[in-house]
Image (cartoon, rainbow, N blue to C red):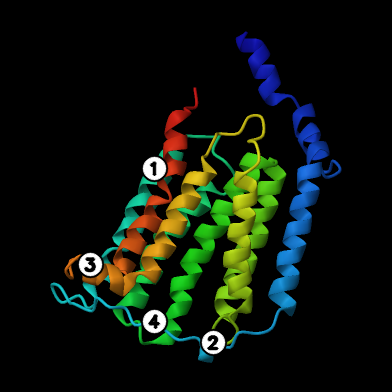
Amino acid sequence: MHADHHVQATDPILPSVHRRCSLAPPQTREKYLIGALALLTLAALFAPALPAAAWHIPHFVDTRPWLGVPNAGDVLSNLAFLAMGVWGSERLRGRNDAPVGASWFFVGLILTCLGSGFYHLDPDAPQRLVADRLGMAVAFAGFLGIAASERISTRAGEAVLVLMMVAGLLAAWVARENLTPWVAVQFGGMALAVGLALTRPRPGAVGVPLGGVIVFYVLAKLFELGDATIFEATGHIVSGHTLKHLAAALAAWPVIRALRDRRVG
């Protein structure tokens, strides 16, 4: 048994088989994915421009300082991203069965902590939004890579990870003047994630519950929209935007839980 296992592990035929699989004609789901990505690209490039100057920077209702930290609730709540990013990265150590994009997803959470915290220290400085969006773009690309690899194929996950990473980072930079690419990446990408969540996992998938991640994302958006309402309803204990950060960070929990359920022997 040991000798056979050694032969299989070092068999020179296996890399060539992997290359042939990677160059195989697209499967049905891969064709649908190519079509969806093409639509997103067309929307980002040719949809009417949304001038960044016309975008109203929201007034975050909780501006209370704490221990010298301005806007402490919205700044310090970003530590939840750091905690989940470090926790998830630790779960990946020693594993070879993690879905494509998982490591970038957790790295993106750590970068989101840094970028969003930097932005909320002085949210009236619009140039800080770039730092906020760059971390989000990395995390979002990682999640879509996970989704595509779980539901379609490994090579689909790799392609989506690279394409959405490049598109997200470029859109975050272009959003200083034109928000259209950023909107296409964020909302179009989430529509793609919902579509993937509604399909069956492929054989051999880790089993990441994509729907759970999406639920936390939607909850975070609702908290964001109810920033002032929640602040008043809780007697100024916590704002909706602070809760948004916590809910968005918890979106990593379904991924981390799936990694806990499978161990490498």
Question: Where's residue 32, x and y in %?
Answer: 77, 51
Give the Cα separation between the discs numbered 2 and 4: 13 Å
Which amino acid, by three-letter code, is at mark 2?
A: Ala
Residue extending farthest to the right is: 25
Mark number, residue 39: none
| Residue position marked by numbered label 1 in the rendering | 90
- Extreme residue in the top direction: 1
Residue carrying label 3 = 233
Of the residues tagged 3 and 2, which is closer to the observer?
3
Q: Horizontally, is 20 left or right of 7 in the view?
A: right
Disc 2, SS = helix
Q: Is residue 114 visible?
A: yes
Asked if disc 3 and disc 1 are in contact, CB closer than 8 Å, the reply is: no
Indicate which label's residue lies in the foreground, 3 or 4.
3
Upstream in sequence: badge 3 or badge 1: 1
Sequence-wise first label, 3 or 4: 4
Say which residue appears at 69% left-offset and 74% top-offset. Answer: 44
Badge 3 or badge 2: first in the primary sequence: 2
Q: Earlier in the sequence, mark 1 or mark 4?
A: 4
Q: Image check: 25 left or right of 39?
A: right
Kindly identify which residue carries mark 2.
52
In the image, what residue type sits under mark 3?
Ala
Point out the frontmost of discs 2 and 4.
Answer: 4
